[in-house]
Amino acid sequence: MPAVQIVRRPGGSFENPWGPASRVPGFAGVLKWGLQRSVPGHARSISRRDFAARFPLATPSFPSPRAPASDVVITWVGHSSFLIQIGGRNILTDPVWSDRASPFRWLGPLRWTPPAIPFAKLPPIDAVVISHDHYDHLDDATIRRLARLDPAPRWYAPLGIGPWLERRGAHGVREFDWWGQDEWTDPRWPVPLTLTATPAQHFSGRGIARNRTLWCGWRLRAGDRAIWFVGDTGRHPAFAEIGARLGPLDAILMPVGAYDPQWFMAPVHVSPENAVAAFSETAAAAARPDGRTPVMAAMHWGTFKLTDESMDEPPERTRRAWAAAGLRPDRLWILAHGESRTL
């Protein structure tokens, strides 16, 4: 059966392959949402001080400089930024260390939670993977800092983002379409690492022009250990296909925040309920032969306020949806910022 593929439009832009329901609302939708947000009390939020008290930073406990090649260690830096230690390598996902998710230092979403690993405390970084080019996932200042590291990391990105990265000092960027993969062998590590770009329902653009670069998730596999970093996505029909093609999986890093209002955000950001449903579809196809299912680690919440739900709402709604689905409590990870867990 052919794998689902991105749609390429005349002129070189990309489009989700699942029809009108997968498309982000246009200017009229943006205007409608802006008018709704202007109503006092429309956007719900816990205060910053109360949020910090309820969700304190954890002290990272990842192995340094590296984890054993047989271990998988996941540390949440914040939002969609993780330090993933797999196959003996240290990998960053969508690294953002700046104070704002914005092209400006003085305007745009300001961090509620600092990066849980100070940049100077990072272990040697072997690779950086990028899901798409939005400001809360692709940060100019952070990319420049990473590009200056010695030795330099490898770079993995969806189609079209390579030139942007190279202008900021990244070298040898590997770009991939959905399902494209790279097998990384290196005498320093006994286990090859395979990185595969996976479908996602989203969009791209850092200005007026949209969808000139691709968006994706990433499956990382070393030996029989595998993690799927979902990236940003709405709910789409290909979750089971991803699980079947790329499983078994040990962990799925799933976004659960930035979903309200759903009439606007559903095409591009799963709600907690849709995140749990998408996880279930994937996990059913990606379980190990012994029946062990992956864990779901929640991400994309608690760092930047991008939408209307309260900053403390996503983890609680995710727990309720998980319980309502009858899933094992120990297979859901609501990590604290900075928390490290070993698979």
Image (spheres, rainbow, N blue to C red):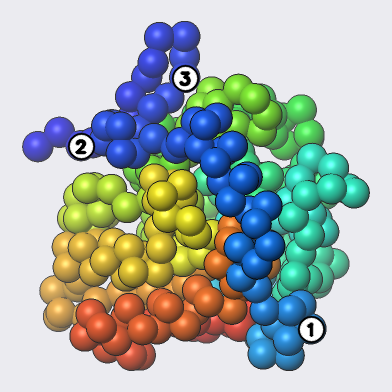
Q: Verify CB contact (< 8 Å) between mark 2 and mark 1.
A: no
Element type at marker 1? Answer: helix
- First along the sequence among labels 3 and 1: 3
Task: Say if residue 109 shows up in the picture.
Answer: yes
286 to the left or right of 180:
left
- Point out the frontmost of discs 3 and 1: 1
Disc 1 designates what residue? 49
Mark 1 belongs to which amino acid?
Arg
- Secondary structure of the residue carrying tag 2 is loop
Residue 35, image x, y percentages: 62, 45
Residue shown at 26%/66% (left/top)? 277
Chain-order first, disc 2 or disc 1:
2
Residue corresponding to mark 3:
13
Amino acid at dot 2: Ala
Kindly report which numbered mark, 2 or 3, lies closer to the viewer in this rendering: 3
Label 2 environment density (alpha carbons within 10 Å; few <14, some 14–19, many ≥20): few
- Residue 73 vs residue 276: left or right? right
Query: Along the horizontal axis of the image, is 161 left or right of 259?
Result: right
Residue at the location (43% across, 78% down)? 317
Q: Nearer the viewer, residue 172 or 283?
A: 283
- The kind of residue tagged 3 is Ser
- The quarter of the displayed image where residue 30 is located: top right
| Position of the C terminus by quadrant | bottom left
Mark 2 — residue? 3
Gap between marks 2 and 3 measured at Cα:
20 Å
